[in-house]
């Protein structure tokens, strides 16, 4: 057997790739996510920690690496938990909430043309649960304040899920956004932005209510959190889009093998 044949036998796609993405890429991108957890970009309302820059790169991960980006986000979350505990105060739970969930929700929105039957019901369940939990239920039974002011509370909650659920259930989310994300020019910016903001607004809900429940946020503090993030998450989505497009364009022109379900 020649040396070339030995190399081909040792380096097989099954050993070097996962869902079409190089394992080396997955690990390196995960390390990038872990390192960027050292950089704060927004403090927790009420104190006690901060959201790190790695959230930006987690949301970008499925756009660059396809489904394998979720694995990168998880790896980065584990690294971040050890090197910057203030960004992951809930430990392993935050590896999922802060470290992995942004990649999952954006992966669902960017491929809503294929995954709408998962995206739409999951987003609806999250939205309804978010409106009820934890103050309407379990409320006082869990040691929390009960009966938040209505209809203000539900209207504030609706901003985080109703518009984005409508988009994902409509032809805009199910057809146009995934199509625009693959096209050049302004349509790509719009496609990526709509997918990212839809995914990030939905991500914020389980992330927020977990903290409210575990740390026994008073209702007034939860409402302050509603207001603070109502502009911050959209602003973050703009930043993610601006960073993502040049990277995607560079990868598209690089001649590297295309990763399935990535948008380059």
Image: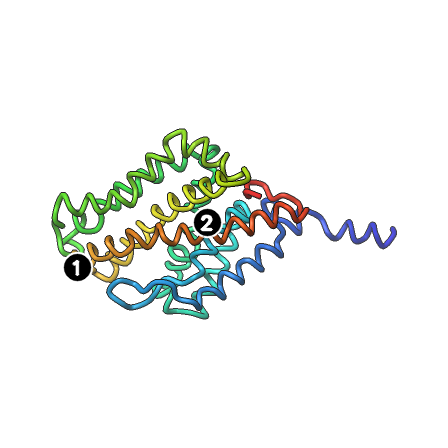
Crowd band around label 2 with a 10 angstrom C-alpha radius: few (<14), some (14–19), many (20+)? many
* Drawn side of residue 170 relative to residue 16, left or right: left
Residue ranking furthest to the top:
171
User: In front here: 201 or 48?
Assistant: 201
Q: Are dots 1 and 2 in contact, CB under 8 Å?
A: no
For the residues carrying marks 1 and 2, which lies nearer the camera in this image? 2
Badge 1: residue crowd in 10 Å (few <14, some 14–19, many ≥20): some
| Residue 51: mark | none
Horizontal and vertical percent position of residue 53: 43, 61
Instruction: In the rendered view, tell whether residue 99 sits above or below residue 111.
Output: below
Alpha carbon distance from label 1 to label 2:
34 Å
Image coloring type: rainbow
Return the residue at label 2.
241
Residue 182 left/right relative to 211:
right
Picture coordinates of residue 204, whole percent (x, y): 33, 51
Which mark is first along the chain, 2 or 1? 1
Q: How many marks?
A: 2
Q: Quadrant of residue 84?
A: bottom left
- 194 over 5 or under it: above or below: above
The residue sitting at 41% across, 34% down in the picture is: 173
For label 1, the residue is: 218
Estimate the x, y position of residue 71 in percent, counting from the top left. Answer: 51, 52
Task: Please provide percent x and percent y for residue 52.
Answer: 40, 63
Look at the numbered disc 2 and give the secondary structure of its residue.
Answer: helix
Residue at 47% of width from left, 51% of height from top?
Answer: 242
Which residue is at the far right? 2
**Residue occupying the point 24% across, 57% down:** 225
Task: Tell me the SS state at disc 1.
Answer: loop
Quadrant of the drawing holding the C terminus: top right
Q: Which residue is drawn at 85% across and 55% down?
A: 3
In the depicted view, which residue is nearer to us: 4 or 208? 208
Q: Is residue 215 above or below residue 118?
A: below
């Amino acid at each position: 057997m020649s040396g070339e044949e030995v190399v081909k036998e040792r380096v097989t796609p099954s050993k070097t790739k996962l869902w079409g993405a190089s394992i080396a890429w997955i690990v390196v991108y995960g390390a990038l996510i872990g390192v960027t957890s050292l950089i704060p970009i927004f403090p927790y309302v009420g104190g006690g920690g901060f959201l790190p820059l790695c959230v930006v790169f987690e949301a970008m991960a499925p756009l660059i690496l396809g489904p394998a980006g979720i694995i990168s986000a998880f790896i980065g979350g584990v690294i971040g938990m050890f090197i910057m505990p203030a960004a992951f105060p809930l430990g392993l739970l935050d590896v999922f909430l802060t470290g992995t969930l942004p990649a999952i929700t954006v992966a669902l929105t960017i491929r809503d043309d294929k995954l709408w039957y998962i995206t739409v019901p999951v987003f609806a369940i999250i939205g309804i649960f978010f409106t009820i939990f934890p103050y309407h239920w379990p409320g006082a039974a869990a040691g929390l304040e009960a009966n938040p002011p209505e209809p203000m509370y539900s209207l504030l909650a609706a901003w985080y899920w109703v518009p984005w659920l409508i988009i994902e259930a409509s032809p805009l989310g199910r057809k146009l956004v995934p199509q625009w994300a693959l096209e050049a020019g302004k349509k790509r910016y719009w496609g990526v932005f709509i997918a990212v903001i839809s995914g990030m607004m939905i991500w914020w809900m389980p992330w927020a209510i977990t903290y409210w429940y575990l740390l026994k946020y008073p209702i007034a503090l939860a409402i302050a959190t509603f207001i603070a993030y109502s502009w911050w998450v959209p602003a973050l989505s703009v930043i993610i889009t601006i960073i993502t497009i040049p990277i995607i364009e560079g990868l598209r022109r690089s001649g590297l093998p295309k990763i399935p379900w990535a948008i380059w």
